[in-house]
Image (cartoon, grey):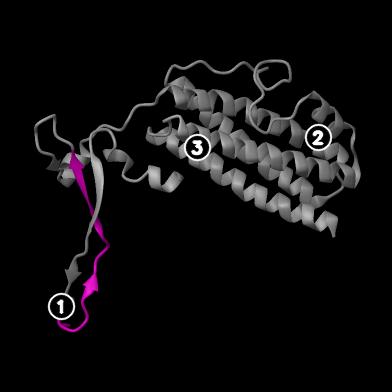
Protein backbone atom coordinates (compact mmCIF):
# COMPACT_ATOMS: atom_id res chain seq x y z
CA UNK A 1 0.00 0.00 0.00
CA UNK A 2 2.78 2.43 0.83
CA UNK A 3 4.48 2.06 -2.54
CA UNK A 4 1.39 2.39 -4.74
CA UNK A 5 0.08 5.52 -3.02
CA UNK A 6 3.36 7.41 -3.12
CA UNK A 7 4.02 7.11 -6.88
CA UNK A 8 5.04 10.44 -8.46
CA UNK A 9 4.54 12.38 -5.22
CA UNK A 10 5.85 15.59 -6.77
CA UNK A 11 2.98 15.61 -9.26
CA UNK A 12 0.15 14.82 -6.87
CA UNK A 13 -0.81 18.43 -6.15
CA UNK A 14 -2.08 19.12 -9.65
CA UNK A 15 -1.60 16.10 -11.84
CA UNK A 16 -2.49 12.45 -12.25
CA UNK A 17 -0.03 9.74 -13.29
CA UNK A 18 -1.73 7.91 -16.13
CA UNK A 19 0.28 4.73 -15.72
CA UNK A 20 1.01 4.69 -19.47
CA UNK A 21 4.57 3.49 -19.95
CA UNK A 22 6.59 4.39 -23.04
CA UNK A 23 9.46 2.05 -23.90
CA UNK A 24 12.31 3.64 -25.85
CA UNK A 25 14.45 1.51 -28.14
CA UNK A 26 18.05 2.72 -28.33
CA UNK A 27 20.53 1.40 -30.86
CA UNK A 28 24.13 1.24 -29.71
CA UNK A 29 26.68 2.78 -32.12
CA UNK A 30 28.10 0.17 -34.49
CA UNK A 31 25.62 -2.49 -33.40
CA UNK A 32 22.46 -2.97 -35.42
CA UNK A 33 21.54 -6.27 -33.80
CA UNK A 34 21.21 -5.51 -30.06
CA UNK A 35 18.53 -2.96 -29.26
CA UNK A 36 18.53 -1.73 -25.66
CA UNK A 37 15.22 -0.94 -24.04
CA UNK A 38 15.38 2.19 -21.89
CA UNK A 39 13.56 2.38 -18.59
CA UNK A 40 9.82 3.09 -19.05
CA UNK A 41 8.75 6.69 -18.62
CA UNK A 42 5.48 7.93 -17.16
CA UNK A 43 3.13 10.40 -18.79
CA UNK A 44 1.80 12.91 -16.27
CA UNK A 45 -1.59 14.36 -17.14
CA UNK A 46 -3.14 17.42 -15.52
CA UNK A 47 -6.95 17.23 -15.42
CA UNK A 48 -8.67 20.16 -17.13
CA UNK A 49 -11.32 22.40 -15.64
CA UNK A 50 -14.95 21.36 -16.21
CA UNK A 51 -15.56 21.37 -19.96
CA UNK A 52 -11.85 21.57 -20.79
CA UNK A 53 -9.47 18.88 -21.97
CA UNK A 54 -6.66 17.48 -19.87
CA UNK A 55 -3.09 18.19 -20.92
CA UNK A 56 0.12 16.21 -20.70
CA UNK A 57 2.72 17.98 -18.59
CA UNK A 58 6.27 18.42 -19.77
CA UNK A 59 9.19 17.52 -17.46
CA UNK A 60 9.63 21.25 -16.79
CA UNK A 61 5.95 21.56 -15.83
CA UNK A 62 6.23 18.62 -13.43
CA UNK A 63 9.39 20.04 -11.86
CA UNK A 64 7.58 23.31 -11.20
CA UNK A 65 4.68 21.76 -9.31
CA UNK A 66 4.50 22.55 -5.62
CA UNK A 67 4.71 19.62 -3.21
CA UNK A 68 1.51 19.00 -1.25
CA UNK A 69 1.48 20.69 2.19
CA UNK A 70 1.11 18.79 5.44
CA UNK A 71 -2.37 18.27 6.83
CA UNK A 72 -4.11 17.43 10.10
CA UNK A 73 -3.49 13.69 9.66
CA UNK A 74 0.27 14.32 9.40
CA UNK A 75 0.27 16.46 12.54
CA UNK A 76 -1.75 13.88 14.49
CA UNK A 77 0.63 11.12 13.39
CA UNK A 78 3.72 12.99 14.59
CA UNK A 79 2.07 14.11 17.82
CA UNK A 80 1.07 10.54 18.70
CA UNK A 81 4.13 8.70 17.41
CA UNK A 82 6.50 10.74 19.59
CA UNK A 83 5.02 9.49 22.90
CA UNK A 84 4.67 6.03 21.36
CA UNK A 85 8.41 6.00 20.72
CA UNK A 86 9.14 7.43 24.16
CA UNK A 87 7.47 4.45 25.81
CA UNK A 88 9.64 2.10 23.74
CA UNK A 89 12.66 3.99 25.08
CA UNK A 90 11.39 3.45 28.64
CA UNK A 91 11.16 -0.26 27.89
CA UNK A 92 14.69 -0.47 26.50
CA UNK A 93 16.00 1.33 29.61
CA UNK A 94 14.88 -1.68 31.69
CA UNK A 95 17.09 -4.14 29.82
CA UNK A 96 20.44 -3.31 31.43
CA UNK A 97 19.38 -4.24 34.95
CA UNK A 98 17.27 -7.28 34.13
CA UNK A 99 18.52 -9.19 31.07
CA UNK A 100 21.67 -11.27 30.89
CA UNK A 101 21.43 -11.75 27.13
CA UNK A 102 23.95 -9.97 24.90
CA UNK A 103 21.55 -10.32 21.97
CA UNK A 104 18.71 -8.64 23.86
CA UNK A 105 21.06 -5.86 24.92
CA UNK A 106 22.18 -5.35 21.31
CA UNK A 107 18.57 -5.27 20.12
CA UNK A 108 17.59 -2.78 22.81
CA UNK A 109 20.48 -0.51 21.80
CA UNK A 110 19.36 -0.62 18.17
CA UNK A 111 15.80 0.26 19.13
CA UNK A 112 17.06 3.05 21.38
CA UNK A 113 19.18 4.65 18.68
CA UNK A 114 16.61 4.41 15.89
CA UNK A 115 13.72 5.69 17.97
CA UNK A 116 15.69 8.53 19.55
CA UNK A 117 16.64 9.67 16.05
CA UNK A 118 13.04 9.43 14.84
CA UNK A 119 11.73 11.35 17.86
CA UNK A 120 14.19 14.16 17.09
CA UNK A 121 13.09 14.23 13.44
CA UNK A 122 9.40 14.28 14.34
CA UNK A 123 9.88 17.04 16.90
CA UNK A 124 11.77 19.08 14.31
CA UNK A 125 8.98 18.43 11.80
CA UNK A 126 6.41 19.85 14.24
CA UNK A 127 8.54 22.85 15.19
CA UNK A 128 9.28 23.72 11.55
CA UNK A 129 5.54 23.75 10.81
CA UNK A 130 4.67 25.66 14.00
CA UNK A 131 2.67 22.75 15.36
CA UNK A 132 2.51 22.04 19.10
CA UNK A 133 4.85 19.45 20.58
CA UNK A 134 3.24 16.69 22.67
CA UNK A 135 3.52 16.91 26.43
CA UNK A 136 6.56 15.16 27.94
CA UNK A 137 4.07 13.11 29.98
CA UNK A 138 1.92 12.11 26.98
CA UNK A 139 3.33 8.57 26.97
CA UNK A 140 2.67 7.99 30.67
CA UNK A 141 -0.25 5.79 31.61
CA UNK A 142 -3.14 7.97 32.72
CA UNK A 143 -1.98 10.97 30.67
CA UNK A 144 -4.04 10.92 27.49
CA UNK A 145 -4.83 8.24 24.94
CA UNK A 146 -2.83 5.02 24.72
CA UNK A 147 -1.88 4.52 21.09
CA UNK A 148 -1.98 1.09 19.38
CA UNK A 149 0.41 -1.42 20.93
CA UNK A 150 1.29 0.69 23.97
CA UNK A 151 1.65 -0.92 27.41
CA UNK A 152 -0.69 -0.06 30.26
CA UNK A 153 0.40 0.26 33.88
CA UNK A 154 -0.02 -3.43 34.68
CA UNK A 155 2.13 -4.36 31.68
CA UNK A 156 4.87 -1.92 32.72
CA UNK A 157 4.81 -3.17 36.31
CA UNK A 158 5.05 -6.79 35.21
CA UNK A 159 7.96 -6.04 32.86
CA UNK A 160 9.88 -4.09 35.50
CA UNK A 161 9.48 -6.95 38.01
CA UNK A 162 10.81 -9.67 35.69
CA UNK A 163 14.45 -10.81 35.42
CA UNK A 164 16.60 -13.14 33.33
CA UNK A 165 14.95 -15.29 30.64
CA UNK A 166 11.48 -14.41 31.95
CA UNK A 167 12.25 -10.74 31.35
CA UNK A 168 13.65 -11.48 27.89
CA UNK A 169 10.50 -13.30 26.78
CA UNK A 170 8.22 -10.63 28.20
CA UNK A 171 10.29 -7.81 26.75
CA UNK A 172 10.18 -9.37 23.27
CA UNK A 173 6.45 -10.11 23.49
CA UNK A 174 5.65 -6.57 24.58
CA UNK A 175 8.03 -4.88 22.15
CA UNK A 176 6.69 -6.86 19.19
CA UNK A 177 3.19 -5.74 20.15
CA UNK A 178 4.45 -2.18 20.58
CA UNK A 179 6.13 -2.18 17.14
CA UNK A 180 3.05 -3.70 15.49
CA UNK A 181 1.08 -0.79 16.98
CA UNK A 182 3.44 1.67 15.29
CA UNK A 183 2.94 -0.09 11.95
CA UNK A 184 -0.82 0.22 12.49
CA UNK A 185 -0.39 3.95 13.12
CA UNK A 186 1.47 4.32 9.81
CA UNK A 187 -1.40 2.56 8.03
CA UNK A 188 -3.88 4.85 9.79
CA UNK A 189 -1.93 7.90 8.62
CA UNK A 190 -2.39 7.00 4.96
CA UNK A 191 -5.99 5.88 5.46
CA UNK A 192 -6.74 9.33 6.89
CA UNK A 193 -5.27 11.06 3.82
CA UNK A 194 -1.90 11.93 5.36
CA UNK A 195 1.57 11.27 4.04
CA UNK A 196 1.09 13.31 0.87
CA UNK A 197 3.66 15.85 2.00
CA UNK A 198 7.08 14.41 1.03
CA UNK A 199 8.64 14.95 4.49
CA UNK A 200 5.80 13.28 6.39
CA UNK A 201 5.76 10.43 3.88
CA UNK A 202 9.50 9.90 4.31
CA UNK A 203 9.25 9.90 8.12
CA UNK A 204 6.35 7.46 8.08
CA UNK A 205 8.22 5.16 5.70
CA UNK A 206 11.30 5.25 7.96
CA UNK A 207 9.21 4.39 11.02
CA UNK A 208 7.49 1.54 9.18
CA UNK A 209 10.77 0.12 7.85
CA UNK A 210 12.54 0.25 11.23
CA UNK A 211 9.64 -1.38 13.04
CA UNK A 212 9.29 -4.19 10.50
CA UNK A 213 13.02 -5.01 10.57
CA UNK A 214 13.06 -5.08 14.37
CA UNK A 215 9.89 -7.18 14.56
CA UNK A 216 11.62 -9.79 12.40
CA UNK A 217 14.69 -9.81 14.65
CA UNK A 218 12.59 -10.08 17.82
CA UNK A 219 10.66 -13.04 16.44
CA UNK A 220 13.96 -14.79 15.74
CA UNK A 221 15.09 -14.20 19.32
CA UNK A 222 11.78 -15.45 20.71
CA UNK A 223 12.12 -18.64 18.67
CA UNK A 224 15.62 -19.19 20.11
CA UNK A 225 14.30 -18.74 23.65
CA UNK A 226 11.57 -21.30 23.00
CA UNK A 227 13.97 -23.88 21.56
Per the rendered image, the range of residues in magenta is 30-46
Nearer-N-terminus badge (1/3): 1
Residue 130's x, y, as percent? Answer: 44, 16
Q: Residue placed at 62% from the left, 16% from the top?
A: 135
Judge whether 151 appears above or below 21 on screen. Answer: above
Indicate which disc residue 204 carries: 3
Q: Secondary structure at mark 3?
A: helix
Mark 3, residues whose alpha carbon is within 10 Å: few (<14), some, or many (≥20)? many
Q: Is residue 34 left or right of residue 186?
A: left
State yes or no: residue 219 in magenta: no
Q: Nearer the viewer, residue 171 or 106?
A: 171
Q: Is residue 187 left or right of residue 173?
A: left
Q: Secondary structure at mark 1?
A: loop
Asked if the residues shown at circle 1 and circle 2 are in contact, with their CB atoms under 8 angstroms apart, the answer is: no
Mark 1, residues whose alpha carbon is within 10 Å: few (<14), some, or many (≥20)? few
Q: Secondary structure at mark 2?
A: loop
Q: Nearer the observer, disc 3 or disc 2?
A: 3
- Quarter of the image for residue 208 reads top right
Indicate which disc residue 29 carries: 1
Q: Residue placed at 49% from the left, 32% from the top?
A: 189
Q: Residue placed at 67% from the left, 24% from the top?
A: 146
Judge whether 134 appears above or below 100 on screen. Answer: above
- Quarter of the image for residue 149 reads top right
Judge whether 69 appears above or below 103 on screen. Answer: above
Q: Residue placed at 55% from the left, 23% from the top?
A: 79
The residue that disc 2 covers is 94
Amino acid sequence: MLGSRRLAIAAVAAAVVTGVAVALIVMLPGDDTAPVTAAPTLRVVQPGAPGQSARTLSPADVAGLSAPPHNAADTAFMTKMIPHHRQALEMTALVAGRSRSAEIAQLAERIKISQQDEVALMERWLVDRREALPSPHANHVGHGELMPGMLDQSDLTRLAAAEGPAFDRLFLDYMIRHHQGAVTMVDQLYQAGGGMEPASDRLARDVNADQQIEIGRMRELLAKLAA
